[in-house]
Image: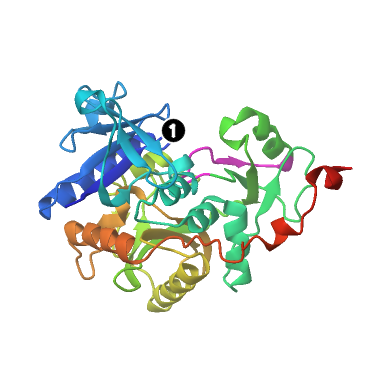
Amino acid sequence: MSDVAVIFGGPSPEHDVSVLTGLQAARGLASGGRTPKALYWSKTGEWFEVDPALEAEAFLEGVPRGSSRLNLVAGAGGGFVEVGGRLGRSRAIELDAALVCCHGGPGEDGTLQAVLDLAGIAYSGPTVAGAALGMDKLAFGAVVDQAGLATLPRVALAAGSPAPEYEGPYIVKPRFGGSSIGIDVVQDFATAQARLSANPHLRFGAVLEPYRPDLFDLQIAVRTWPELSLSAIERPIRSTSTADILDYRDKYVAGEGMAGANRELPAVIPDSLASGLRQAATTISAVAGVRGVARIDFLSDGETFVVNEVNTIPGSLARYLWVEPPLPFARQLADLLEEARQRPTHGYSAAGADGTVLRSAGSIAGKLG
């Protein structure tokens, strides 16, 4: 029987959190009776098979001792290949399905998903298109706005950009990023533009939106297999009453990814607000092409809300949010793998490429003349 795998790590600012999620998932699968292959993507972009029973500290200095180097090969017959296996021969790892636990960067923006598609590996979580949309804050905001949901006005920020119609203070965010890393709160537009050269997380693009200190965070998870279902609504608690935003430390430094963060769960909010959030989450799942498990983040004043962003591979796979009714982690993981097998992410076809254009093309040299 082919193996299942957990894929984690990657050259991303969220590498360490991905290690935690991947190790949690490996243990969750083992508790359900199936020990997976643990495929670790290093900070430098190399692949290794590691012991799925390792603890987090084994990764403090990089690749754990005793790891086996792998190559990830795209194309027919590709996949994860052990380098210099038995008798010095390369050996492909046969996988039934892979659980993707990468956060941020190329593990969550569609890059890894595209390679897995080309290699013919069934995987959990977002498709290439869904991952790319979720990672692009500007595009996601536009899709949500077109769906008729309330959002804060969000514009692209670049050197020479005109000032927006709304006044500061502002939040400056990396356009392509999966967490609160690199986010700044600034008082005026000149400072926002100055951050473009000072903040390395903004070098590939930035967005600007108004800072609303009156709003607090509300989050809900969705999962799409065996049917669309919604978790309890969470109100994350910021580290201090004066914190500008729910930042990376609030989310992850407790040691278990999002599972260890301070929160109110279920959130104590009016029924009308809860109903609106659930309806919005259902709409976003459809228009953003959510697949697997995702966390949708909102901002609220206690009565109304605006959509903030979608996290297509959330920390700890949002396992802590499934409390009404409780969902065993092993069951959640099994469903993710079953969806990977039963709901393909792509369907490549060469239909229509029947040679007609080639036969009528004539001389290429003539077309260049």
Residue drawn where x is 79% and y is 52% of the image: 362
Residue drawn where x is 33% and y is 46% of the image: 101
Front residue of this view, candidates 338 and 89 = 89
Residue 185 is inside the magenta segment: yes
How many numbered markers are drawn?
A: 1
The part of the image, by quadrant, that contains residue 256 is top left
Quarter holding the C terminus? top right
Q: Is residue 15 shown left or right of residue 329?
A: right
Q: Is residue 64 above or below residue 233?
A: above
The part of the image, by quadrant, that contains residue 232 is bottom left
Residue drawn where x is 39% and y is 73% of the image: 274
How would you rate the neighbour count of disc 1 (Cα within 10 Å): few for under 14, some for 14-19, many for 20 or more?
some
Q: Is residue 90 shown left or right of residue 169?
A: left
Q: Is residue 312 shown left or right of residue 341?
A: right
- Amino acid type, callout 1: Pro
Residue drawn where x is 26% and y is 41% of the image: 93
Q: Position of residue 104 (x, y in %)?
A: 45, 43
The magenta span reads: 177-189
Residue corresponding to mark 1: 11
Q: Position of residue 205 (x, y in %)?
A: 64, 41
Q: Is residue 58 shown left or right of residue 14?
A: left
Task: Give the SS element for disc 1.
Answer: loop
